[in-house]
Image: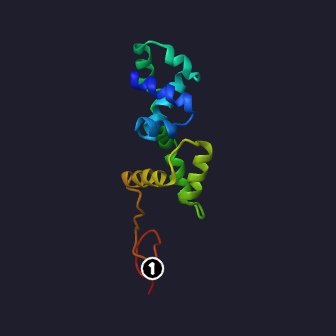
Amino acid sequence: MDQIKTLLSNCLSNGSIKTTARQLKLSKNTVREYVRRAEAHSMDLRKLLEVDEETLSRIIQTPQGDESGSRASVFEQQVDYWLGELRRVGVTRELLWEEYRSAHPGGYGYSQFCEHLRRQISHRDLTLALAHEPGEVHDGLSTQSPG
């Protein structure tokens, strides 16, 4: 926990994640994640530096919610709607993604959105099966080619 306190105090003193990462020889993402967890508990990082190590450990070690799980659940709730919309003329994955991101700014990026959508399509085996050969006339009783 001494390292976490050092990280937080360094970030407070210089005000920069990049500088903190460089000085402590850590990844910017690592510094950003610890600062995010600390700020999720208290916006005043100075107060967190004053707590005992056990309390700080609980704060830092306990995730404030599984973002990937919430993104996945939001995505799952809308899949049926998107699959229906994709059948409409002029509706593209990009349009659906733009609509999704405007409603959920922290949602999947475009490539992940398309990948998850592709998995849903393949999982549900949503392929079009033709009941007749192309070019054949189907009158409901027989499938004979026009003669």
Q: Residue at x 48, y 35 (%)?
A: 20
* Residue on which disc 1 sits: 135
Q: Where residue 57 appears, x then y in whole percent? A: 40, 19
Q: Which of 45 and 88 lies nearest the eye of the viewer? A: 45
Query: Would you place residue 15 above or below residue 144 in this image?
Result: above
Q: Residue at x 60, y 52 (%)?
A: 98
Based on the displayed image, in which of its 4 quarters is residue 135 positioned? bottom left
Q: Which of 67 and 12 lies nearest the eye of the viewer? A: 12
Q: Where residue 28 appears, x then y in whole percent? A: 46, 40
Q: Secondary structure at mark 1?
A: loop
Q: Where residue 41 appears, x then y in whole percent? A: 53, 22
Q: Residue at x 42, y 81 (%)?
A: 145
Query: Would you place residue 44 above or below residue 134 in this image?
Result: above
From this viewpoint, is residue 101 visible? yes
Three-letter amino acid code at the position of disc 1 = Gly
Query: Would you place residue 131 above or below residue 13 in this image?
Result: below
Check the picture and name the quadrant holding the N terminus. top left
Q: Residue at x 57, y 33 (%)?
A: 15
Check the picture and name the quadrant holding the C terminus. bottom left
